[in-house]
Amino acid sequence: MKRTLFAALLFVLGLAGWRARLTAPDPTFLLRDRHGRFLAEVGATAGDEFGYWPVAKLPQRVVLATIAIEDQRFHSHSGVDPTAVARAVVVNLRSRRRLSGASTLAMQIARMQHPGRRTYPRKALEALTALLMTVFHGRDAVLAHYLRVVPYGNRVHGIAYAARRYLDKPVEDLSWAEIAFLTSIPQSPARMNPFLPLGRARAVDRGRRILDRLLDRRVLSDEEHELARRQIAELVVPPPGERPRDALHAILRLERALQSEPLRIKHCAQPVVTTSLDLDVQNEASWIVSQAVERWRPRGAGNAAVVVLARRTNEVLAWIGSSDYFDAAHAGAIDYTGILRSPGSALKPFLYALAIERGSITPASILDDIERGAGGITNADDRFLGPLLPRTALANSRNVTAANLLARVGVDEGYAFLREVGLHDAEEPARRYGLGLSIGGMPVTLERLVRAYTLFSREGRLGDLIWFREQSPAEQRRLLSEDSTRQIALYLSDPLARLPSFARMGALEYPFPVAVKTGTSSCYRDAWTVAFSTRYVVGVWVGDPDFRPMNRLGGYRSAAEIARSLLLELHGDQTQGLDDLSFPPPRGFIPIRLCALTGARATSACDRVIVEWFRPGTEPVDHCRAHVRMTVDTRSGRLATAHTPHDFKEERAFVDLPPRYAAWAAAAGLPRPPTTIPWNDAGRSHDAPSLASMATPRISITAPENGIRILLDPETPPEAATLALRAVVDPPVPQIVWHVDGRPFEVVDYPYVTRWRLAPGEHVFVARLPHARASSSSISVSVE
């Protein structure tokens, strides 16, 4: 029997000792926007309860008020107040019901840490726990812990959090009236809810009694007491803040960011977190997105997402995860800033920047857009714009030039660079995407894409997005030179360079400097735009949650409109168009006028001129020779001579491009220079020497590719199932003969383009000169 009692006693002591630990959930966070406006309470680990903020140094006023109302003999007992216990026993026995308690602060902590039914055995266990708690930790620690965990209603715990939540001030700044008001709440948090008029009145009434008690104990002077009673009667509790409906995805993203260990440790000591968000920008962006998506719903747009950054700091000002969080029909609860989608052409600036950085191209390089590019990639509009400078090729978002450029730089190198800028984690090998990297073959998220574009907005330095005003920015890595990124900014902000693919005065043009790049994925499933001005970076995605195609709703006609509406609102002081419309060129570079077709220095004969910037000593030195002015005989269109009558002479401009542009130039209607003189002195016609060299012509077949395999489509009419035959002859000749399988097929005039009807089998194609031995290499094609 004694052993049993002893064992039971040891068990009770052990249980009480275990319960005597001072435990509390981690502090939660009170989020505010950059201007101090309420955003949310986040970080709760104990159900839906918030607060639990530790107070490094307890304000003396709070200590005195708490002890006066909750535990008057706190400093004279060891966790259990015998006087209070005796008084409670007498009162309860006389009334035959429980009217008075005797809980000290330590006993209240024991009950809060291990709640349960209020029975006498449990009360005895709480008393034992309180004794051990006071012995183990000391009175000051017990008092501090009480003020950290005590409930103040509305899921608020701790005096520090209550001061912020109800009165919007730090606990150190509380007046006597405010302390009395807050100290009154823990007795009955539900009945004294400060957010309800009746509850607030009850708290004020009890607060007055607390002030009276403090006066009786001479804690307050008569003057302080009178002032506090007046102030508590006039005390105003701000209305409870609610999570902004338009910022729910942003709040969830902030909560995830706070879960990172470095940020949690940093903010635990100061749990009032001022975020980078600007509710004004957030609300404006949300309104623009919701209106736009509603307008485009008939065309298949299901949702949209927007990210807005401060350009100088990378601070996140707005984060729109969907057009409506509560729109279940369009999966509005999904945050589309973090969903992998095909970016279309939005990755092209990174490939151009890499090529410029490595010297693979210069601003004067000519990129061919004359036929399908490497890997058979063609342009979205099925047009070819001919020889292009990098500025024009990127601004027009040509797929062919981008694919050829990636082939020149190297797929592995391009893929590695896209990893460096944070667009992927190398979970797949580069060969999975191949040259498709240049046209959106690799999916990305809007968050990653916007972060990557800060490489251009911050002139070559890449840094993380900043979510909190107190957050120390991560070390920025320089991945590109300032010169390369400034060139890209000039290309993307030039409205003239976008012609003819993108019309003037559309969604890409602004009354102030803005660099813009759009992207559209296959079948219009995704529409993208990333734009940056001198102040902001804006990223937009529009698409359908189920990856269904939209009705010709690309980046230019959807996402770009959202970006433009938002930037015009953000730059409200610059909408008059009085600012410089361009970004600064690379430092120390000089402007050079270039011919848009050749990349050589422009002459008076060049009809399209572009100003490009070069480091001194690297600019082109040769002048354009392709654009020439010649005097022709208007009767024949051939070169005039000294014997041509004056009335039939006319000076005309001509374009003499290298032979590989023959088919494109003919299709574009560019005038070729005349090659013969009309009449000799005797009045007889004769041929004159060609402007080109009279060397033996070299013939190269450019289409089809050697070794390709073609599958016949049974649904294609036979007359429509044809194969394009194209060749380059240098120097040009009037005609060539196409041979198929050893037999002449067709005599074709300059520029030597024709089509051959597909027939099953193995076929060999050769291009020859008529009445000459010169011929091309043979090309083999398999048709099945």
Image (tube, rainbow, N blue to C red):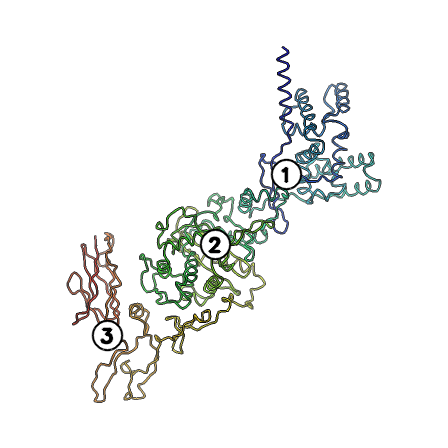
In the rendered image, the vertical position of residue 693 relative to residue 401, given as above or below: below
Identify the image quadrant of residue 600: bottom left
Viewer-proximal residue, 29 or 16?
Answer: 16
The numbered mark, 2 or 3, whose residue comes first in the sequence reads 2
Local SS, label 2: helix
- Let me know if residue 485 appears in the view: yes
- Label 1 vs label 3: CA separation? 88 Å
User: Neighbour class for label 2 at 10 Å: few (<14), some, many (≥20)?
Assistant: many
Q: Position of residue 323 (x, y in %)?
A: 50, 49
- Label 2 vs label 1: CA separation? 37 Å
The numbered mark, 2 or 1, whose residue comes first in the sequence reads 1
User: Neighbour class for label 1 at 10 Å: few (<14), some, many (≥20)?
Assistant: many
Identify the image quadrant of residue 572: bottom right
Q: Are marks 1 and 3 in contact (CB under 8 Å)?
A: no
* Numbered tag placed on residue 452 in the rendering: 2
Q: Which residue matches tag 1?
A: 51
User: Neighbour class for label 3 at 10 Å: few (<14), some, many (≥20)?
Assistant: few
Q: Amino acid at mark 2?
A: Ala
Viewer-proximal residue, 733 or 330?
Answer: 733
The image quadrant where one finds the N terminus is top right
Q: Residue furthest top?
A: 1
Q: Is residue 94 left or right of residue 774?
A: right
Q: Amino acid at mark 1?
A: Gly
Q: Which residue matches tag 3?
A: 695
The numbered mark, 1 or 3, whose residue comes first in the sequence reads 1
In the rendered image, the vertical position of residue 742 relative to residue 595, given as above or below: above
Name the residue at 47% across, 48% down: 336
Q: Are marks 2 and 3 in contact (CB under 8 Å)?
A: no
- Let me know if residue 562 appears in the view: no
Q: Position of residue 377 (x, y in %)?
A: 33, 57
Local SS, label 3: loop
Local SS, label 1: strand
